[in-house]
Amino acid sequence: MASTRNFTARALYLVAVIAEAAVWSGLWAHRSLADTGMAPVSCLIEPDRVIRLSTPVAGIVDSVSVDRGDRVTSGQIVARLDTGLEEIAVGIARKRAEDRSQIAALEAQIEFLEAQARRNERLLKKNAVSRSQAEEARLEARLAERELEQARLEQDLAAMQLSEAKARLEQKIVRSPIDGVVMERLLNEGEYREGEAHILTIARLDRLRVEAFVPIAYFERLELGQHLTVVPEPPLDTPHPAEVTVIDRVFDAATATLGVRLHLDNSKLALPAGLRCELHFDSADVAAR
């Protein structure tokens, strides 16, 4: 019985020691973080977006107007497949869509038939024509009106066919969807390309993405919209402000870190992408450099 009490006392004493050690450890860690600040971490500067361009249709490459390293703007034509047949189809569809000759002829015919029907109705009242003749004139006018409606419908369809022909032509023209820089060119004039084949890679550089992994201890001191300082590797080691846009909610238990993403304004294209960097959380620390 005495041994049981001694064992219980020792166990309680051990628990108390462990608890006290944990408290002091936590206080020391908090004091250390407060004294030293949040240490810088390594990061990587990448393009905000990287787009692999392709064509939705197959064809022979007619021209390529850019090469690796060239700057492009949104909507700029960077390549074109052979469009001879599509341009002919657009011309034919445009002629049909703009042709109003049949509509004009039917409108004139209706005007004549309606005038004739009114005249026959006046003559019918004077018994100068038979009722069947008067009704026949009115019927011809109504039939002409139906033909006019059909002609207008056909012109609307012709306008839609023109839009379709233009869309088919546009499929042979490759445009840049963003402002950026050509990273890779995979085609030359005269080559045949299958539909959806990768032909160009364009990166957006006017805004850069900064990726970093920070200790879990930093989590409660980070927030979206917060501005931190990014220092690229030499010789481009001028500090740049960046805004926190992503804070991971799933941590990496193996390394006790979490992912953070920032956006860095690079509208003057002063920085290239693909640089290593340091992410600083204290402006004083950056100034000390």
Image (cartoon, grey):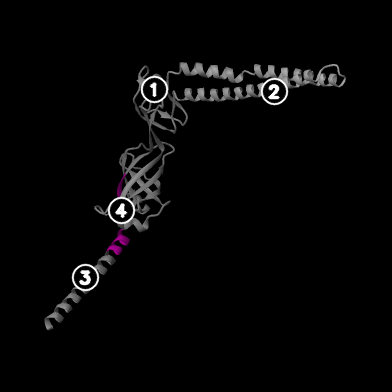
Q: Earlier in the sequence, mark 4 or mark 2?
A: 2
- List x then y, in percent, for residue 119: 82, 19
Residue at mark 2: 145
Image x and y of residue 216, in percent: 30, 56
Task: Name the image quarter holding residue 138.
Answer: top right
Residue beneath disc 3: 18
What type is the residue that disc 2 sits on? Glu
212 left or right of 148 in image: left
Q: Secondary structure at mark 2?
A: helix
Q: Which residues are magenta?
A: 29-43
Q: Amino acid at mark 4?
A: Phe
Q: Residue at x 34, y 53 (%)?
A: 285
**Figure check: 91 above or below 279:** above
* Residue type of the residue flagged with mark 1: Ala
Mark earlier in primary sequence (1, 3): 3
Checking the image for residue 251, the label placed there is 4
Q: Earlier in the sequence, mark 4 or mark 1?
A: 1
